[in-house]
């Protein structure tokens, strides 16, 4: 993906602005040639992290900005949020990367402020001398946020908190956060249940930190699907069966959706625990099905490096222990089932009853209560007895 210049998947299907607008048929050959031409001017080399075989970074030297690394969807987030071309994205990243700002949430916060201004919720009082053009407005707002000056002090708290601090109807424009955190700006058609579960129950900040081991959509061509599965060395057998049986415009069984969600998140927790880049493991499975590191060879690698004797089940057990420990921290801070939901307009076609059935099945599979709290039995089995004792002492779990 780092070397693919066809951006039609992102710009034609992902949402622009603060996740409200889709621009179908935006991409064309002329635009691709323009973007590639500019890329050749500002890219100095391909690079990667230390000792990694994958050169998935661009080193960008934009005139007047410091040299920075560019990776993944950051290439598009600012230009799409501001309704600008790619030149603007290269330019503003030279500032935001120096400031250490997140490339997913920051552009949504800035676009959110523009929406509020256009709706009359923010005015010249909060935004004195607010420019006309999208690019100029973004630079103006970025300066306010970075220095926490005026309205920028509120916007720096993120869309969810800022909407509630601003009030006066601003909450209606917060429609792309899950558990108070900005998500990748998507507005899609029919609900995808594995992703519904990942959005609802994930302990990570963004869906891209959970997805990846299982394809996002069914492979329509039966021959290509069969070939994918034949080469899918990273997948346990039951996932191969579910993918083979998954037809376009159909939902997988609830059992499959629950297991896909669990496997996706488990492999990311494995990567987090050993310091493996998701591009070489957990996020790569959906692209060709053959990541170099996976559930069946990582135990041997860990054994050689650290002397820890593991098999695949043992590796999953560690990931689930970590998962439940993070879950427990969030439960202590007040996380419950009532906030485990994606944005209301994330998918056009929803089935509320079926969504709750998936959530019920997922909680049961994980060994959690119907409110999403890990049970004493689950915590104790994962050697987290001190957590169950803490929960009982706090009244989160019953003493009996």
Image: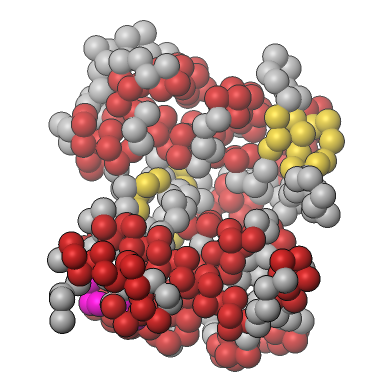
Residue 85 vertical placement versus 292 (above, below): above
Which residue corresponds to the image point at 18% horizontal and 65% vertical from the top-left? 393
Judge whether residue 178 is colored magenta: no
Which residue corresponds to the image point at 52% horizontal and 22% vertical from the top-left? 135
- Image quadrant in which you'd find residue 377: bottom left
Which residue corresponds to the image point at 47% horizontal and 73% vertical from the top-left? 320
Considering depth in this image, is 232 or 337 the residue closer to the camera? 337
Q: Can residue 288 be spotted in the picture?
A: no
Count of numbered labels shown in the rendering: 0
Relative to 186, 221 lies left or right: right
- Image quadrant in which you'd find residue 18: top left
Q: Residue 369 location, x and y as percent?
A: 25, 77
Quarter of the image with the N terminus in it: bottom right
Quarter of the image with the C terminus in it: bottom left
Residue 323 vertical placement versus 277 (above, below): below
Considering depth in this image, is 121 or 241 the residue closer to the camera? 241
Considering depth in this image, is 256 or 325 the residue closer to the camera? 325
Q: Residue 279 location, x and y as percent?
A: 69, 58
Q: Which residues are magenta?
A: 367-371
Which residue corresponds to the image point at 31% horizontal and 47% vertical from the top-left? 180
- Image quadrant in which you'd find residue 225: bottom right
> In the displayed image of the protein, which residue is found farthest to the top?
129
Q: Residue 356 location, x and y as percent?
A: 26, 76
Relative to 202, 393 lies left or right: left
Q: Residue 141 location, x and y as percent?
A: 42, 21
């Amino acid at each position: 993906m780092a070397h693919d210049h066809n951006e039609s998947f992102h710009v034609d299907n992902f949402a622009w602005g603060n996740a409200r607008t889709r621009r179908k048929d935006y991409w064309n050959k002329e635009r691709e040639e323009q973007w590639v031409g500019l890329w050749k001017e500002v890219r100095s080399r391909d690079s990667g992290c230390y000792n990694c075989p994958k050169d998935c970074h661009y080193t960008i030297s934009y005139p007047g900005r410091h040299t920075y690394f560019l990776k993944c969807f950051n290439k598009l987030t600012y230009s799409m949020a501001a309704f600008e071309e790619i030149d603007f994205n290269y330019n503003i990243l030279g500032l935001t990367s120096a400031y250490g700002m997140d490339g997913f949430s920051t552009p949504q916060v800035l676009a959110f402020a523009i929406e509020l201004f256009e709706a009359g919720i923010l005015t010249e009082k909060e935004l004195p001398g607010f420019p006309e053009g999208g690019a100029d407005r973004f630079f103006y707002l970025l300066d306010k946020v970075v220095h926490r000056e005026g309205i920028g002090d509120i916007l720096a708290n993120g869309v969810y908190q800022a909407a509630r601090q601003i009030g006066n109807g601003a909450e209606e424009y917060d429609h792309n956060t899950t558990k108070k955190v900005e998500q990748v700006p998507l507005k899609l058609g029919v609900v995808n249940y594995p992703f519904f579960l990942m959005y609802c129950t994930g302990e990570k900040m963004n869906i891209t930190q959970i997805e990846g081991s299982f394809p996002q959509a069914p492979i329509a061509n039966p021959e290509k699907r069969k070939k994918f599965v034949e080469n899918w060395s990273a997948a346990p057998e039951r996932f191969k069966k579910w993918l083979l049986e998954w037809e376009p415009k159909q939902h997988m069984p609830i059992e499959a959706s629950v297991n896909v969600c669990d496997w996706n998140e488990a492999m990311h927790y494995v990567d987090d625990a050993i310091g493996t880049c998701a591009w070489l493991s957990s996020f790569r499975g959906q692209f060709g099905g053959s990541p170099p590191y996976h559930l069946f060879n990582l135990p041997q690698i860990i054994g050689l490096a650290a002397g820890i004797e593991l098999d695949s089940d043992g590796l999953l057990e560690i990931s689930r222990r970590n998962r439940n420990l993070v879950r427990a921290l969030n439960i202590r801070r007040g996380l419950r089932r009532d906030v485990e939901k994606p944005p209301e307009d994330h998918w056009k076609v929803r089935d509320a009853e079926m969504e709750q059935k998936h959530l019920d099945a997922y909680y049961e599979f994980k060994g959690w209560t119907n409110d999403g709290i890990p049970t004493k039995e689950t915590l104790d089995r994962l050697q987290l007895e001190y957590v169950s004792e803490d929960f009982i002492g706090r009244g989160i779990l019953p003493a009996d």
